Image: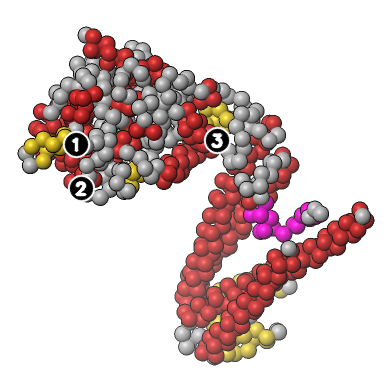
């Protein structure tokens, strides 16, 4: 038996009730155009209602102001000669006496005889109340205005093609991603076409404002996703942490940024440059948690960090993950509407959040904080700069990588058991707990950066994602000072780029720090004025040849 | 069979409408009480601003009856309590009834 649909006219309840009705409910209720239209009407009604009330209260406020003026001037004279109103049509000359005595209506049939000044005090008290009411009304109005906007979008969507919505994302080339997690790339797998988004403008309605809004939505979605994903990544190795470094691309990363596909991580992931070569070449930025303007078509495989960092098959993006993220992120534009349909949602990525939660592999989840990273780096640089400058071994084979990961214990070099796992929190990228860890990590990263050479690591520092913090300048300067072209340290972001000279080092980034070099790689590639896209591995191989 | 269902439906619709009416009635009553509550609050605050030199009157019909300040304050306070109690009494059972009856 169906429940009867009786529409109630009562005002405050329906707007909120109807507002919640089309919201993404667990039971998928198809969005009907008339429903959405009605919702919009209701919301607009509320908005206009609020506006009227605000007008009314403003008038009241003005009246009180006038009254106050009158009260202040009234006791100036002992008596005034006035025309006293006699009924609705007549006046009579008379005198206004006892000018200081005012009988004030306090409300609810209560009166009080006061002096003029006391009356002014009462007026002030009332004005305060009026002001509060106006404030509340304004808040409500704002709230509903945003709701109306949203409903408008919803309406457009539903108008266009019923229940399905097309989500389109303008993607420009050369954008930069900060990959939070890597997706295990299957070797030689092609990126899914669904990952590529077309820049398209279907509706004339899509204005820049809409895009901006969408960016915000996209960003919110991505942030949420990051949170979720971080929660899911409970058993990640440190490689993820390193990847997370890249994601520290600041929240302030703007769309203008040269966003480059973070190909580096592929290099770091792969143990053999050759394997990740092909897909790296495409080096597409992956959507999902990346918050930069997508310039290129998204090729999720290439630079997507995933939980499968441990895999040797990291070369190619794991499209599934990418898809999920993409869909999730991109689909965030409109609630509850599927993709692949006619009404178009314009989606653009925004800046990534700064904070990344990464599991260090010892049942700890550290929060990656860029500020702490900077602090670490500063400390590291201040203390161990000389040390880091020395250790820049050339890496030609995977074994070199392991050699780089050597712990200094009691003055002796002790090979670390696993380069994937942080020895302790000290060396983790995440700077959650200890200050020292930050410092050490910075140092280590500095080393690794130099180690992990990609074809364009030199300019990585410059390519790094832009962060507005001044600390970055430190980083920038320190890296070039090291003398070698270092891989990008995830947190440093710059827009301008140093001349992209290729490093002599082979382009094998340390897998433990995937994100740092990768992002740099991506950045470098994007920044290269040649505009030529060469995969990291290819470049490194070329270098090696040279 | 169809008629049975229709009758049932009819009954349900009527019940629902009745509930809606009750709801709106209690809503308006609640609004009135809320308005009185705010007004009496203002009066209370303004009486607090006055001092003993002011004469306080109460309007009873066409007559302004002189009251004492202390007395006025007490009266207003009592009225406030009464209104709050009314709101409390009248609102809660109504809110609870509607969802129950709806199922």
> Is tag 2's residue or tag 1's residue first in the polypeptide sequence?
1
Looking at the rendering, the stretch of residues picked out in magenta corresponds to A4-18
Of residues A356 and A511, the one nearer the viewer is A511
Task: Please name the residue that numbered disc 3 is placed on.
Answer: A331
Q: Any magenta on residue A15?
A: yes
Query: Around disc 3, counting alpha carbons within 10 Å, would you say few (fewer than 14), some (14 to 19), or many (20 or more)?
Result: many
Sequence-first disc among 3 and 2: 3
Chain letter of disc 1 in the image:
A
Question: Residue A402 occupies which quadrant of the picture?
Answer: top left
Residue A88: image quadrant is: bottom right
Residue B39 is drawn in which quadrant?
bottom right
Question: Residue at image x 48%, y 22%?
Answer: A191
Where residue A264 appears, as percent x and y from the top left, is 32, 25
Residue A164 at what x, y percent from top left? 66, 33
Residue appearing at x 27%, y 39% in the figure: A421
Name the residue that disc number 1 marks. A416
Q: Is residue B77 visible?
A: yes
Would residue A62 be seen by someone viewing this image from the given angle? no
Which of pointers 1 and 3 lies earlier in the amino acid sequence? 3
Judging depth in this view, the residue of A191 and B38 nearest the camera is A191
Name the residue that disc number 2 marks. A435
Quadrant holding the C terminus of chain A: top left
Task: Give the color scheme: rainbow, by chain, secondary structure or one colour.
Answer: secondary structure
User: What is the C-alpha distance between the residues marked 2 and 1?
Assistant: 22 Å
At a point 83% along the width and 60% down the height, the residue shown is B13
């Amino acid at each position: 038996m169906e429940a009867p649909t009786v529409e109630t006219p009562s005002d405050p309840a329906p707007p909120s009730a109807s507002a919640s009705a089309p919201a993404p409910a667990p039971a998928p209720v198809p969005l009907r155009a008339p429903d959405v239209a009605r919702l919009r009407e209701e919301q607009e009604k509320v908005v206009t209602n609020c506006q009227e009330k605000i007008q009314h209260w403003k008038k009241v406020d003005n009246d009180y102001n006038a009254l106050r003026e009158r009260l202040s001037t009234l006791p100036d004279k002992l008596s005034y000669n006035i025309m006293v109103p006699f009924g609705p049509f007549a006046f009579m000359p008379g005198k206004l006496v006892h000018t200081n005595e005012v009988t004030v209506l306090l409300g609810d049939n209560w009166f009080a005889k006061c002096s003029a000044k006391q009356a002014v005090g009462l007026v002030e008290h009332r004005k305060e109340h009026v002001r509060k009411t106006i404030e509340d009304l304004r808040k409500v109005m704002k709230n509903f205005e945003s709701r109306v906007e949203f409903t408008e979008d919803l309406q457009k969507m539903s108008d266009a093609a019923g229940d399905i919505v097309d989500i389109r994302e303008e993607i420009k080339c050369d954008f930069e991603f900060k990959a939070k997690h890597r997706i295990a790339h299957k070797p030689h797998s092609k990126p899914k076409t669904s990952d590529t988004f077309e820049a398209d403008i279907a509706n004339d309605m899509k204005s820049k404002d809409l895009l901006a809004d969408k960016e915000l939505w996209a960003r919110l979605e991505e942030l949420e996703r990051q949170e979720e994903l971080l929660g899911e990544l409970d058993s990640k190795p440190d490689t993820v942490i390193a990847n997370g470094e890249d994601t520290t691309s600041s929240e302030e990363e703007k769309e203008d940024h040269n966003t480059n596909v973070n190909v580096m991580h592929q290099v770091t992931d792969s143990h053999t440059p050759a394997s990740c070569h092909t897909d790296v070449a495409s080096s597409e930025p992956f959507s999902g948690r990346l918050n930069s303007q997508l310039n290129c078509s998204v090729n999720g495989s290439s630079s997507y960090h995933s939980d499968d960092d441990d895999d040797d098959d990291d070369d190619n993006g794991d499209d599934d993950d990418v898809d999920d993220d993409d869909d999730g992120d991109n689909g965030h534009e409109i609630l509850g509407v599927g993709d692949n349909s006619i009404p178009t949602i314009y989606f653009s990525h925004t800046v990534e959040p700064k904070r990344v939660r990464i599991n260090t592999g010892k049942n700890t989840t550290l929060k990656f904080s860029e500020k702490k990273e900077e602090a670490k780096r500063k400390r590291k640089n201040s203390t161990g700069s000389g040390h880091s400058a020395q250790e820049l071994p050339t890496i030609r084979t995977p074994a070199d990588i392991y050699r780089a990961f050597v712990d200094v214990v009691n003055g002796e070099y002790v090979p670390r058991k696993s380069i994937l796992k942080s020895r302790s929190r000290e060396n983790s990228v995440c700077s959650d707990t200890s200050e020292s860890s930050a410092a050490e990590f910075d140092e280590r990263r500095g080393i690794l950066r130099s180690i992990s050479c990609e074809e364009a690591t030199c300019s990585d520092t410059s390519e790094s994602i832009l962060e507005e913090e001044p600390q970055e300048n430190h980083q920038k300067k320190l890296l070039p000072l090291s003398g070698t072209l270092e891989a990008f340290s995830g947190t440093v972001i710059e827009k301008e780029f140093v001349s992209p000279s290729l490093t002599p080092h082979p382009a094998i980034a340390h897998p433990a720090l995937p994100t740092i070099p990768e992002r740099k790689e991506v950045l470098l590639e994007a920044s290269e004025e040649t505009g030529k896209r060469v995969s990291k591995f290819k470049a490194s191989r070329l270098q090696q040849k040279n | 069979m169809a008629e049975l269902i229709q009758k049932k439906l009819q009954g349900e619709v009527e019940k629902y409408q009745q509930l809606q009416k009750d709801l709106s009635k209690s809503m308006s009553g609640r609004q009135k009480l809320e308005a009185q509550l705010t007004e009496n609050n203002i009066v209370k605050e303004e009486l607090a601003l006055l001092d003993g030199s002011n004469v306080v009157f109460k309007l009873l019909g066409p007559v302004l009856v002189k009251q004492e300040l202390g007395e006025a304050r007490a009266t207003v306070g009592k009225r406030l309590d009464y209104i709050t109690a009314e709101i409390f009494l009248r609102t809660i059972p109504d809110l609870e009834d509607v969802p129950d009856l709806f199922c």
